[in-house]
Amino acid sequence: MTVINAPDVLAEVAAAVDAYELALMTNDVEALDGFFRDAPETVRYGVAENLYGFAEIAAFRIGRSGGSPLRDRLRTEITTFGRDFAIANVEFLRTGAKQSGRQSQTWLRTEGGWKIVSAHVSLLQAGADQRLAP
């Protein structure tokens, strides 16, 4: 039977998600690249881009001047499945924005540690019904 949210695994993934957020907010491109699995199957859908494979993701990071817009995390939900697979969902609000955004990441334990194998970032449309975390 697969164990959901084993405390030690959940803590490992939460630490990885927190470290990713710090790298994102400081535009640490090298660290950001290190969080993604270096493989052609890795996918990242952004607000305005679809990136297939690690090479496209890394090229996007290098070409993105100034990095990600600053944001506050409103809610983070992490679920682990067994010892080697996890999903992290983050609701965020960009500085000065009224609409929240969402980020989902699929994490896989590899020989090199926890790596993102799939990611998606989107923003709610203006006027969309949204729940902001308290």
Image (cartoon, rainbow, N blue to C red):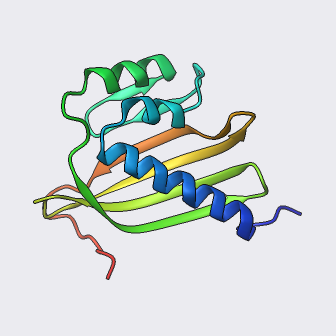
- Residue under the point 20% across and 64% down: 128
Front residue of 20 and 45: 20
Residue located farthest toward the bottom when viewing the structure as drawn: 134
Quadrant (top left, top right, bottom left, bottom right) of the C terminus: bottom left
Residue located farthest toward the right when viewing the structure as drawn: 1
Location of residue 19 in the rendering, given as x and y in whole percent from the top left corner: 47, 51
Res. 53 visible in picture: no
Res. 108 visible in picture: yes
* Up-down relation of residue 20 to residue 134 (above or below): above
* Up-down relation of residue 124 to residue 27 (above or below): below
- 122 left or right of 86 in image: left
**Number of marks in the rendered image:** 0
- Residue under the point 23% across and 70% down: 129
- 30 left or right of 49 in image: right
Front residue of 6 and 103: 6
- Residue under the point 69% across and 34% down: 112
Location of residue 78 in the rendering, given as x and y in whole percent from the top left corner: 56, 63
Front residue of 115 and 105: 115
Quadrant (top left, top right, bottom left, bottom right) of the N terminus: bottom right
- 118 left or right of 5 in image: left
Location of residue 22 in the rendering, given as x and y in whole percent from the top left corner: 38, 50
* Location of residue 26 by image quarter: top left
* Location of residue 32 by image quarter: top left
- Residue under the point 61% across and 56% down: 13
* Up-down relation of residue 65 to residue 85 (above or below): above
Location of residue 75 in the rendering, given as x and y in whole percent from the top left corner: 40, 69
